[in-house]
Structure formats: structure tokens, C-alpha cells
Amino acid sequence: RSKQRGRHGYTLFNQELRRDQADQLALEAELRHALTNDYELVPYYQAIVDSQTGRLAGFETLVRWHHPQRGMIPPSVFMPMAEESGLILKLDRYMIERACAQLAAWYAEGQLSNEVCLHINLSSTHFHDRTLLDWLLPLLRQYGLPAGTLHLEVTESALIDVPDLAISVMKQLKEEGVCLALDDFGTGYSALSYLHRFQFDVLKIDQSFVREVHCQEESAAIVRAILALAAALGLEVVAEGVETPAQVQALRELGCTRLQGYYFARPVPAASLEWERLNGIVPAATALSA
Ligand code: C2E
Ligand code: MG
Ligand code: MG
Ligand code: MG
């Protein structure tokens, strides 16, 4: 359908989706169907880089829906529906299973060192009961993944509804060696004390603060404050949405140790990863200061 609209069909399609409830229902049924096959929902991988050495530090898994009729649908279009319908629980589980299998395959091929971690986005809905533990922990054992390789990324919003339950589920995950990352940090509303209570290991600085970190004092001040807070609490920090050498330079100078963004690599399917480039992803310090 979007094909008939030509070059701008994609945009029109996105706008229409938000308006059209019938289409939402159709999309929901289509997502339900997509979850029964193994070719429509595809994990894409985006590199996370060590800002000092330039070496690959990890990957974030991001879902892409290759819809057989509608073409590529980005998460921003179907995530709200997936959350509302509860299909997100199945979707996340599917993505984790695919990503863990992929990670185990990379280890088997000798493609990765044990220090490279895998970040997976998880809806905070998973923390509203204990079901996550029932399938995730056996999965990790099944693949024999080294403790600490799996980093679960969650956003703070929905954790606040059920703090005690969320904390107890997170505690058990941590006992198994799973790391927890707080995604989009700085965009939510939670009290800073939650950082500590939820036992996060990693903060991901939202891209809205990264965009002008090199040219606007306010953004730099926010990033500096987040880094100081993280250092005081013993948390790792990843800056998201890094697109230019100037941003890389500024973030390095501020002392941010992990960077992620189009400047280094876009999210791509596993088969399209450029391992040679990733293993020396920032070629030389001179390239950054240029
Ligand atoms: P997120 O986890 O904060 O992921 C970062 C988003 O920024 C991704 O968008 C990524 O493609 C994009 N990005 C990365 N580098 C750059 C850059 O340099 N510049 C810009 N402008 N953007 C960059 P994407 O893939 O569209 O995903 C959007 C959101 O959807 C994610 O935000 C995450 O919250 C959610 N999501 C994606 N995959 C999954 C999944 O499998 N499960 C769950 N629960 N949520 C997911
Ligand atoms: Mg994320
Ligand atoms: Mg984010
Ligand atoms: Mg986000």
C-alpha cells in the first residue's frame, strides 16, 4: 500500500497510522502474526565504542520490522501499539532469544572477546511481575553466556509504578550477573535516589544532551553533572546519538568512556557488521581532533 504513494508514502503512512484506529488494529494483528515467523522481526546491532581506545565495547540490539507488504516499519511506529496490546512481552523475549543465540555464535566463531557486552532494550512492563526471571535465567544458562555480558536497558518511567517489585526482580537478575542500564537518562522524572535503589550499572545519556554537547554550555554542564553523579555512584556511562567528531571530542574531554552513534556505526543486521572496521573503530586519535 505504501508503495502506491511513491517517494513520500513512508511519511504519509506514518502519519496515517497515528490517526487511524482500524489500521492500528490491523497492525496489531500483523505484529501478532510476525511473532510466529522468524523473518519479519529482525534484530539490528549497533556498536558501542570505548572512547579512549576506540575499540568495540558492546552492541545494542534494536528491532526492525521488515513487513512483507508495508516495508520497513521503525520501532517508533509500532512500539506504542506493542506496549498497549501487551505484545511487547513476546517481542522482547523473541529479540533476546535471537540476540543470545547470535552472541553465542559469535563467541563460538571466535569473533568476540568476553568483554564485549550485549545491550538489549526491555519494556519496563517486564518488571510488573516475575515472569521475566522464569525464562531469562534458563536462557542465559542454555547459551552459557559469560556473566555480565547481558545489559538490559530499561527506561525509568514505568518502573516507578511498582518500585518494590521491580527492585526485587532486578536484584535477582543482578545476582545472576546480568547488568542493568538506564536508557534515555535525563528525560524521565524519577528521583535520583532511584538510581541507587534500582541498582543500575550503566546510565545512557539521552541523545538530546549529546546533540549540542560540543557547542552549548548548558548541554555540556548537564553531561558533566551526569558523569560526576555516575562516578560518585560507581556507574558506567554511555553517550547515545554521537554523530560528529566534535561531539566525540567534547565527550572524551568530559571523560565519558563509552560512545554510541551514527558517527561510529548505524544499526545493521548481523550479516552486515563490518568486523574489521569495528575492531579498530576509531582509526586514530588524529582522526578525532581533525
Ligand atoms: P533507544 O533504546 O534509546 O535507542 C536509540 C535510538 O537512537 C535507536 O532508534 C537508534 O537507531 C537511534 N540512534 C542510534 N544512533 C543514533 C545517532 O547517532 N543519531 C540519531 N539521530 N539516532 C541514533 P530506533 O532503533 O528507532 O529505536 C527507538 C526506540 O525503540 C529505542 O530507543 C528503544 O526505546 C525502542 N526499541 C528498539 N528496539 C526495541 C526492542 O527490541 N525492545 C524494546 N522494548 N524497545 C525497543
Ligand atoms: Mg536503548
Ligand atoms: Mg536511549
Ligand atoms: Mg529511546
Image (tube, helix red, strand yellow):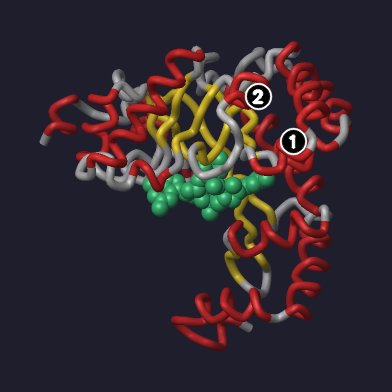
Q: CA distance from mark 1 to mark 2?
A: 11 Å
Viewer-proximal residue among 96 and 250 = 250
Q: In this rendering, would 121 be left or right of 219?
A: right
In the rendering, which numbered label is found on residue 123? none
* Quarter the N terminus occupies: bottom right
Residue 220 in the image: x percent, y percent? Answer: 28, 36
Q: Residue at x 66, y 79 (%)?
A: 19
- Which residue in the rendered view is the most extreme toward the bottom? 4
Disc 1, ligand 1: is the CB inside 8 Å? no
Q: Residue at x 30, y 21 (%)?
A: 255
Q: Earlier in the sequence, mark 1 or mark 2?
A: 1
Viewer-proximal residue among 8 and 166 = 166
CB contact under 8 Å: marks 1 and 2: no
Residue 266 visible in the shown view? no
Is 17 above or below relative to 30? below
Viewer-proximal residue among 290 and 159 = 159
Is 258 above or below relative to 126? above
Name the residue tied to disc 1: 97
Name the residue tied to disc 2: 104
Residue 96 in the image: x percent, y percent? Answer: 71, 36
The quadrant in which residue 151 appears is top right
Tell me the amino acid under the disc marked 1: Glu
Residue 221 visible in the shown view? yes
Tell me the amino acid under the disc marked 2: Ala
The quadrant in which residue 175 appears is top right
Alpha-carbon neighbours of circle 2 within 10 Å: few (<14), some, or many (≥20)? some
**Which one is in front in this view, the residue at disc 1 or the one at disc 2?**
1
Secondary element at image label 2: helix
Secondary element at image label 1: helix
Residue 261 in the image: x percent, y percent? Answer: 39, 42
